Amino acid sequence: MSTTTLLGVLLPVVPLVAGLTGLLLPPSPRGAATGQETARRLAVGLGVAGAAGALALAVALLFTLDSSTEASTTWIRFGGLTVTLGVRLDGAAALVAVAVAAVALAVQVYSTGYLKRGPHDDVDVDHRYPPYAAQISLFTAAMLLVVVSGDLILLLVGWEVMGLCSYLLIAHDRRLPAAPAAAMKAFLVTRVGDVGFLLGIALLGVSAGSFRIADVLAHDHGTGTLTAATLLLLAGVAGKSAQFPLHTWLPDAMAGPTPISALIHAATMVAAGVYAVIRLWPLFEATPTVLAVLGVMASVTLLLGAFAATAQDDIKRVLAWSTVSQLGYMTGALAVGSPPAALFHLLTHAAFKALLFLAAGVVIHAVGTTLMSRMGGLRHRMPVTFWCTVVGLGALAGVPPLSGFWSKEGVLAAAESALLGDGPAPAWVGWLVFLSGLLGVAVTAWYATRLLLRTFFGAARDPLLNPHDPPAVLRWPVLLLAVPAVLLGLAGFWPAFADRLPSAVPGEPATAELLHVAPLMLLPLALLALGAGLAWVRWRRDSAADPATALGPLRPVFARAFRLDDVQHTLVVRPTAALGRLARGADERLVDGAVTGTGRAARALGGGLGDLHRAALPRAATAVLAGALLIGLAAVLIGATS
């Protein structure tokens, strides 16, 4: 086994071992301060060591990987199908692995301070920290398994473990009544997409006779089989990467702890769907119909998330809806045939969105609320958090030269090229992604400016609060994440970085597909200035008023995300619940009724016979004589007739 292969194998194994070991830590009873502190220290050590080890391995892989490498061994054979254990390593896998491990390490360190009893907590949550840290390690291991897996079945294992870990982590804070419901919703909605993902994998494996990714990509699938399989895979992508219409779980997942929001939104679960399409890109490239479906889905998701973010009062929900919108940019880049642009935006988004969530967590930790209507005036009291948030929101909106500007520009340039007919998808898909992307730039700038103004500027809306910048354990992860949020976009100018991205044109470097310094850049910059300017002007007129009031009657529509949750509840949840009640009633009244009725009838018959058996002697003798007479009479009658 080569050094590169060994690094790839160890990447998911290290956090997996840390997670499993953490789950084996003995639980500490509530109130046992010494036992809780010991268990917490062990959990912190395991969690941080597992994430740090994964990051070290990922960086080593990134710098030692010269070309695509694959190694596998047969795991199971059943029928004519083969399932292998192995890794498939390339530049894209190494870059995503670094992003996943870096965000996981930041979250593990940040959580050690965030999940301590604070000034606004009335319950000590330390007794549940060990399973929390272990579940983060398992979540990280599952995502890294998806990243390096060389077999679709192995990829599916990591895919499903992520779903389970997301359920556990979102529901971690059981003091919040919304947390268990949000966790169940995330689990069930993503499961809907996962059914299609499983069927798509099965269809490809049966067609190729193997689940090994290299074999699946090399096989000449029939057009119908390939179209059906990739459409089914898109269902899983829609679930994991929160694409319309399976996006509704992601904003509700904000009920989980803020570090978990950063982990899910930045580099793990929501990135898995986009990465899966990049991993299997040749299959999607060969099916323009599926790319057209992906383009429509991406455009709707992009605008839906952007407009919904404009009317939220909860700072975490603003960021959650912005994640939905930014995922639309990534899938839009894939729809127009540019995996490099999609992966580039995935990486920059991981940096600035993790930064924004952790900075938001600092604010929430300081003021004790997630509502922007109770914030304000924090700029001077929390200067470090303020400037880090400025960097994150600037990258989100696409302010040059921050990272989000370059990656978003790459998506728009790819869409412009596709609308001219240069791409695997129809030209109208390029127009759709291009126009929705431009509109998304203006709307993103508007809600990013609103968040900054409502949170950090103006007068303090709650004079009882005394916020301040966080302690070092919370501050340093935020400061360090600000570095890639500023500089990662410039890495596109570095040939060594661009060479590790997948090129949409075989044999050509991806550098030309990443950076586009052209007059087209002026249009999104003008829209950026327009969106930010409108929010600023509205705020300047009345700094005490919410700029979202400018939306007028559209505000409640946007706040409820076009009431798609209500539509889902009406068309899916209610009929399913009614069917469940009907099945339960039928089971209780018919199945259980038949069983209990039979028992009752037998018991009644037995009781009646018992009563007869216990009759008094005179009555019993009379009954015997009467029976004998009836038998004798019957015998006489039978003899007379014969």
Image (spheres, rainbow, N blue to C red):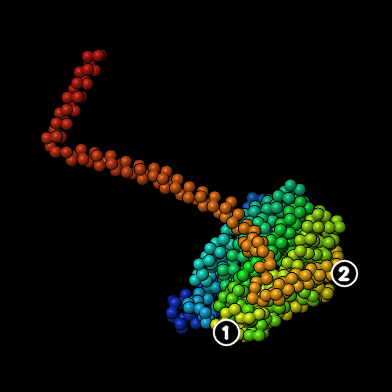
Q: Tell me which residue sits at (76%, 61%) in the image.
A: 436
Quarter containing the N terminus: bottom right
Task: Classify residue 269 as left or right of residue 121.
Answer: right
Answer with the quarter of the image where residue 211 lies. bottom right
* Residue 518 - label: 2
| Outermost residue, left side | 618
Q: Amino acid type of disc 2?
A: Ala
Q: Tell me which residue sits at (76%, 54%) in the image.
A: 292
For the question of whether residue 75 can be seen, the reply is: no
Task: Classify residue 582 as left or right of residue 634.
Answer: right
Secondary structure beneath disc 1?
Answer: loop
Residue that badge 1 annotates: 466
Who is closer to the viewer here, 268 or 254? 254
Task: Classify residue 588 as left or right of residue 5.
Answer: left
Closer to the N terminus: mark 1 or mark 2?
A: 1
- Estimate the x, y position of residue 88 in percent, counting from the top left: 72, 65
Task: Tell me if mark 2 has few (under 14), some (14-19) or many (20+) residues whose alpha carbon lies within 10 angstroms of its own.
Answer: few
Who is closer to the viewer here, 608 or 258? 258
